[in-house]
Image: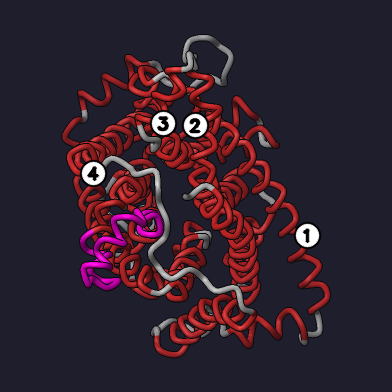
Amino acid sequence: MAASGLLPAGSVPTPVSVIDDLISNVSYYLGNAAPTVVTALEGFAIALVISLVFGAVGSLTGLLERSVSRIALAIYCLPLPALLPLISSLEGSGPPTRITMAVLFSFFPMLIGVLAGLRATPADTAAIVHVAGGGRLQILLKVGLRSALPNIIAGMRIAGPGALLGALVAEFSGADHGLGVALVVSQQKLQTAQTWGVAIVATLIGGVLYGAITAVGRRLHVDPVEGQAATTGAPGTGPLRTVIELLTPVIALIVIWVGLVLFGGASRLVFKSPVAVLNYLTSHRAAAAHREALVSDWLLTMRDTGMIFTAGMVAAFIAGCVLVSFPVLLRLGLPLLIASQCVPQIAFIPLLVAICGRGAAFIVVTGLLVVFFPAMIVIVTALEERSRSTIDVVSVYSGGRWAVLRFVRIPGAVPGILNAARISIPLALFGALVAEWLVTGNGISEAMTTATSTFDYTRLWADVVVVTVTVIVLYEIVAVLHERARRRFSV
């Protein structure tokens, strides 16, 4: 591709030039990779501890579980790169901000894996512990955590490269060293070989993280059991409980928001209160114009999000089915799949623009880099979690790969596929915001960038509220479908 002449000169370096730069400047790459890796590991470890604690505590009460997952979702779906200046205003531009970004990028998929795994505790084994006098805590410790390992490992595999990406993105603002700093410097100096070298180093690090987590999972993996049912309290269907479940995370988010404004030590010019945002959209003399502009930007972002979500989920489902049916392809294609997740998008923006332009094709391709890999990992995990005996029954009746896939794997994987959709919703929104922020120059992401540059922080916070509410509503819809599918396909 570099020598084909199909792309603008200088946009793609030759492999020889990239390898030569890597060898010649190996100390430079290692020196910048070290702080990024340390930050990523610290953020990953913190996210893992928080996920296990919140997931374990949340699984003991269905209400708390839903509240925790929705608060985590609301935080995770925020356009974190655009909000990096706000985070820096609270913690400064040092290591705490970078670790925070690594935690935020990796926390949600890990928590979803923990919660999904704990809710699928084998009912028969849990019943034995209960009959022996064990309560919910004993069931959680002796059965739940062990049976949840496949889902926890799947979430960790997504979160590992995510922590690396969060650390790298945080280094775009205020760091002295790191792969993010090297990436920005190389792009500013038009050193394409070094830009690709940084991307390759980031990919290798992400691959090592993924491989290490996978190796741990293989050592700890417990064969899944067909008969599964949640041992945590099933969510009630009464209207009062439904209202409480919806209001609890909303109230918690508002409390966190007000707490940051009042006690976070941030400038009141930057951090606006909920009352200020409400007035901006309702009672301000230009409230109608504010709402009209906000709705217009929101529609564009939702269009982009829908394109990314649909393309990512369809591609992940097809790829998952193929890879599960032909395991050798999974082993051969895994490095490329890891690369699609670990390489920072911003490194290849010029290349993607040259290939796809600045329209719908760019949005879909950029979004696929965000959505496809996590969704595919969850779908593959769900498709593989079928008992050997059930597959053997189909094989005995001369059923081939297609029959096993159609009659065993796909029906049993419906809850897992919907779980992948739950993870993909905030990721699709994130992909749309990044595409709008870096290239297309429209939608809510561009409005947030403009608001930041013009010090219109009330509009910025209004955009954040709208984005958060939207993704929570979409998530709730898929969560309802996931719960029904889980009950329908559990015995």
- Secondary structure under tag 2 reads helix
- Secondary structure under tag 3 reads helix
Q: Which residues are magenta?
A: 114-142
Q: Earlier in the sequence, mark 2 or mark 3?
A: 3
Picture quadrant of residue 260: bottom left
Taking depth in this image into account, of 206 and 51 the one nearest to the observer is 51
Q: Are marks 4 and 3 in contact (CB under 8 Å)?
A: no
In the picture shown, does residue 117 fall above or below 32?
Answer: below
The mark lying in front, picked from 4 and 3, is: 3
Taking depth in this image into account, of 451 and 275 the one nearest to the observer is 275
Task: Using the image, tell me which numbered label, if any, was put on residue 408.
Answer: 2
Q: Is residue 205 magenta?
A: no
Q: Earlier in the sequence, mark 2 or mark 4?
A: 4
Picture quadrant of residue 275: bottom right
Amino acid bearing label 4: Asn
Task: Using the numbered discs, state the Cα–Cα distance from disc 1 to disc 4 in whole angstroms.
Answer: 41 Å
Q: Residues within 10 Å of mark 1 (few under 14, many from 20)?
A: few
Amino acid bearing label 3: Thr
Residue ID for mark 1? 296
Residue ID for mark 4? 32
Q: Earlier in the sequence, mark 1 or mark 4?
A: 4
Q: Residue at x 28, y 20 (%)?
A: 19
Q: Earlier in the sequence, mark 2 or mark 1?
A: 1
